[in-house]
Image: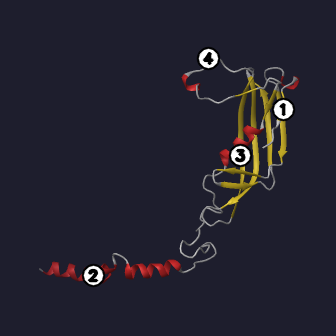
Amino acid sequence: MDSIIIKVDERLEGAGSVLPISGHIDQDSYSLGDHDFALPSGIDYDLVLTNAGEGILASGMVRAHVVGTCDRCLEDAEFDIASEVDEYFLFEAPAEEELNDDEDEVDFSLVSDDDTIDLAEPIFAAILMETPYVVLCREDCKGLCPHCGANLNEGDCGCAEKMGSVEAATGPFAALAGLNFDDEGEDSAQE
């Protein structure tokens, strides 16, 4: 993703100053793990930059329409993302002694030496955070038949029924199919 550089100038000079920022990013795709996703309409963002005294708080929403591949049936899976951005850009890095034990692992960004911030990373992180780990075309997707590969959302291929009858005739429990448990229970009751 290209940088989205915002100058921290007189518009954000005093504590409490706010600057609304909105725009569109012509990003056409991204990847997450083994998944590739298309962004046919890019990414839209509406943020507010606030001078919070020790830094600039960037907060707001990002939105995107995403097209991926269903993990079950391999057809297109479309979904919309609406995610919050909440990033703090400090004017100066905190001294080691100012960090609590809990804050040792806290990530933070800094306002650059040329008084700019780059919003691309928090916007992209917000998109990634709302991208599902398991991508489905619909919640009740039936997937593909493991035997013939037919898309079970389009109809039953009949393989399950065929495989079930073969399994019943040749499976490890096939010998139990001939047992009649009702007769045995009656004999025990008569004695």
Image: 115 above or below 1: above
The N terminus is located in which quarter?
top right
Q: Nearer the viewer, mark 1 or mark 2?
A: 1
The picture places residue 176, in percent across and down from the top left corner, at 30, 79
Disc tally is 4
Per the rendering, the mark at residue 127 is: 3
The picture places residue 16, in percent across and down from the top left corner, at 79, 23
The C terminus is located in which quarter?
bottom left
Query: Which residue in the protein does label 2 denote?
Result: 179
Crowding at label 4, few (<14), some or many (≥20) Cα neighbours within 10 Å? Answer: few
Query: Which residue in the protein does label 4 denote?
Result: 98
Image: 34 above or below 117: below
**How far apart are labels 4 and 1 at the CA level?**
28 Å
The picture places residue 31, in percent across and down from the top left corner, at 69, 51
**How far apart are labels 2 and 4 at the CA level?**
77 Å
Query: Which residue in the protein does label 1 denote?
Result: 6
Image: 125 above or below 69: above
Q: How is the image coloured?
A: secondary structure
Q: Are marks 2 and 3 in contact (CB under 8 Å)?
A: no
Image: 191 above or below 36: below
